[in-house]
Every structure is written in C-alpha cells, then in structure tokens.
Image: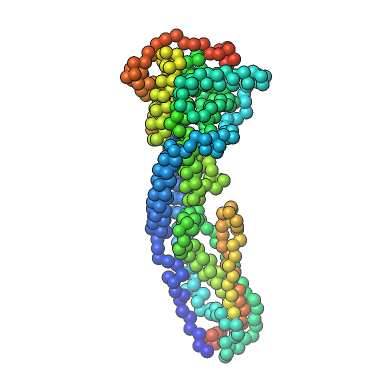
Amino acid sequence: MQWSPRAPRDDVNVSRTHPLSEAASLVLGIGFALFALVAVAWGTLEIAARWLPYDVESKLFGGLRPAVGGESHDTRPHDDAEARRVAVQALLDRLSSHWPERPYALRVEIVGAREPNAAAFPGGAVLVTDGLLRQVRSENELSFVLAHEVGHFRNRDHLRRLGRSTLVGLALAAIGFGDASAAATSQPFLLLAGRGFDRAEESDADRFALELVVAEYGHGAGAADFFRGLPDAEAGLGVRVAGWVSTHPVSEARIEALEAFARERGFAMQGSLAPLPEALAHDRAEP
Amino acid sequence: MQGLGALIQLGLPLLLLVVAYFTGSFVERRHYASIRRREQRARRLPVLAFRDVPPGWEVQEAALVTGTVVISLDHFKRFLANLRNLVGGRVVAYESLLDRARREAILRLQESAFEAGFRAVVNLRLEGFQVAGQGEGRGTAAVEVVAYGTGLRLARAPGGPEA
C-alpha cells in the first residue's frame, strides 16, 4: 500500500466567520430582542402598578420588612428608640390624614443608617434613617420628607420601582450578568435604568408633599430645608458629571420647582416653624 | 459619584473584553503559524487511524506514543459562547479552539514518535476532556485533547525508498 504525504487541509473545521462580526450580530440581535421584551414588560408593569388592588398589595407585601441599612448607631435604650418611632408615626398619621382616600395604613420603620434618607416600600412601610432624624431641625422639615414618601404611595411609585428593578435584574441575569459574582456589577445598570422616570416621580411627590404640609401647617415654611441641609454628596462631583443620573432632581432645581408650585397654588411659604416632637429633639452637640 | 462608579463598573468589564479579544487573537494567530510550520515538517511521518499495520510494512518495533495539549478559553470567546448559548446555533467561537487543540496534540504525538525513532503511527485515537472550569463557569475553562497511537519502527520508510 502506498502512502503519500499530503498537507492537512486548514479550512474545514473552522468557520470563516470573523469573531467580531459574530459578536456584533449576537450582541445586536440579543440586545434588540431583550430591549423589546423589557419594553413590553415595562409597559405592563406600569399598568399593573396603577391597577393592582390595594388589598392585594397589602397581602403581597404587608409582611415585607425591608432589609436596608446597617447596624443601628443609636446607643440609646430600646424604649427611647420606640418612643422616637412612635413620634414619627404620629407625625406621619397626622400628615396622611389630609389624604383621606389613602387606601392603607402607613407604618414607620427607623433604620440605623447614617446618611439622611427616607424611602417608601410596597405594603405601606416608610423607612426613615437615623441620619435623617439627626439632621432635621424642625417638625416642618421632617413632615415634608414624610409627606414626600406619602406622595410616592399615592402615585404608587414604590410598586413601579420594585417592578423595574426586578425586571432589569431579570434581563441582566438572562444575558449572564446576573450571577452572584456579577451582582455588584449589575447594580449601576439597575440604578441607571429608572432614572429619567424617577425624576418626574420625585417632582410629583414633592408637589403632593407640599400640599399635605400646607394642609397641616397652613404654610410651606421649612419644607425645602431638607434640600438645603443635604450634604454635598449631591452638590459635588455627581451633579457635574451626570445631573440626569441623579435620582432626585438636583436640590436647587427642586427648591425652585417647589417655590414655583407654591406661587401657582398661592401657598404661603413663610410662617413659624413647629419644634421637633420631644422624643426627637436632639442636642446639637451630638455628632 | 454614583455616575463615576457606574462608569467604572460598566467600563471595566468592557475593557476586559477588548483586551481579551486582542490577546486572544494574537495568541491564536501565533499558534496557528506554529502549527502550520510544524505540520509541513511533520507530514512526512504518517499518522493513520488503521488498527492494523498496513500490509507490506516491515515492523521492527512498536510502542505507545501520545501527545496531549491543554488550551484555555479566552474571556472574549467565553463571552461569545455565552451569548450563543441564548439563541442556539454553531458555537463558532470554540471551533478554532478545538481545531488548534486537535492539531497540536497530533503534532506533539508525531514529534515524540519521531524523537523515539518511529517512522509511522497507526491506530491513532483522539480523546477530549474538559480539565478545568467545570460547573457554573467557575475558574478558567480549558479543553484537553489527548492523541495516542502505536508508533512503528520500520525497515523501510512508507512511501519512500530505504529508511
């Protein structure tokens, strides 16, 4: 038997597709399909958030105790912490009484985080941070922040937000960014996703909050103090680099928008400030 | 600040992909150049898949010869394959990887056979393994190809006159 040496063929087992054109068609194709899917789901969620019956929401999320914030930095005794919660709750109840159609009881939870913040969660939980309680200087200022969260409940922004973050998380998981090691990576996508919409929502909630505060105190004095007292986190790099990325419209713009709204409605923006409730009063020397 | 963080967290994986594409294709081009060069030399040593010694070959000695290679996936190929996983179809990104592994394994078998004084290999078999990165994409995925066969010392070179 004769054996003759031949050069092996080079081009049979490897496709000629260039890796970059393969990458482009895959990324574009999958990206487009995913975008379409997310757009449809997004629209569905917007509608669902508007129409989800309140009792269903309470049933679904009533037991939700949001795990946010870290260890409590509050070293005061437990009774004292409860007294503070009750004081904030009382304030929230007074404010939400000006929204008589409110469909469910709102419940205050204080979390031990240092940064001043508040948040609305599905099921009616209003989260308030230690840092916020330490920063506010008048009842009016705290009331505005609480009323702002009530505004999110009225517009059902909390549901929309939950739906959105779930949706974006799912979409990212689908293209392989969602596994445990990449959970941190997906965070910025998540944050970016709802920004443009959030700003409109924040402005709506601001206007509703001002209405509640004016109904309670007869004037809107002190309402915007929270924005004035915000640490420079928002006024620093964040604003210049990406004003539109920031969830909350930049503080100054928000104050101006509030004042314009007050003028339009004929709300008084001057008046005497109510002192903080006894349980929340803090001496200024405290860090 | 968040914007900057997002930029870093978005940009870093993207940068990694770009770097992996360039390093990956550089390594692959270099490997193919080496494979083609060595195949030109090695093709005079016949490697056959027959189980039996072809008639007419006068065998003086026979022994097992092997050639193995482990080739790693690069990040860019893995990214492509992951996307391909979603929609199905030929995983083009891995084709060149397997092609290189198979040809390199056979080349190493030929080279080791030649060094041992064999002038032909029969009963060539190829096996593929995944030696790393098993399960949930942890670690570095790599493919191992083992080529083994029976090296023959012959009285006369196949297809030629005296050895």
Q: Quadrant of residue A17?
A: bottom left
Residue B117 in the image, given as x and y percentages of width and height:
61, 78
Q: Is residue A71 above or below residue A80?
A: below
Residue that protrudes farthest toward the top in the picture: A272
Residue that protrudes farthest toward the left in the picture: A264
Q: Residue at x 39, y 35 (%)?
A: A196
**Foreground residue among B111 and A263:** A263
> Is residue B115 among what the camera can see?
no
Residue that protrudes farthest toward the bottom in the picture: B56
Residue B31 in the image, given as x and y percentages of width and height:
49, 63
Q: Is residue B144 above or below residue A99?
A: below
Q: Residue at x 66, y 19 (%)?
A: A79
Q: Residue at x 39, y 11 (%)?
A: A270
Q: Quadrant of residue B162?
A: bottom right
Q: Name the colour scheme.
A: rainbow
**Foreground residue among A1 and A75:** A75
Q: Residue at x 49, y 34 (%)?
A: A54
- Name the quadrant of the C terminus of chain B: bottom right
Residue A109 in the image, given as x and y percentages of width and height:
57, 26
> Is residue A182 among what the camera can see?
yes
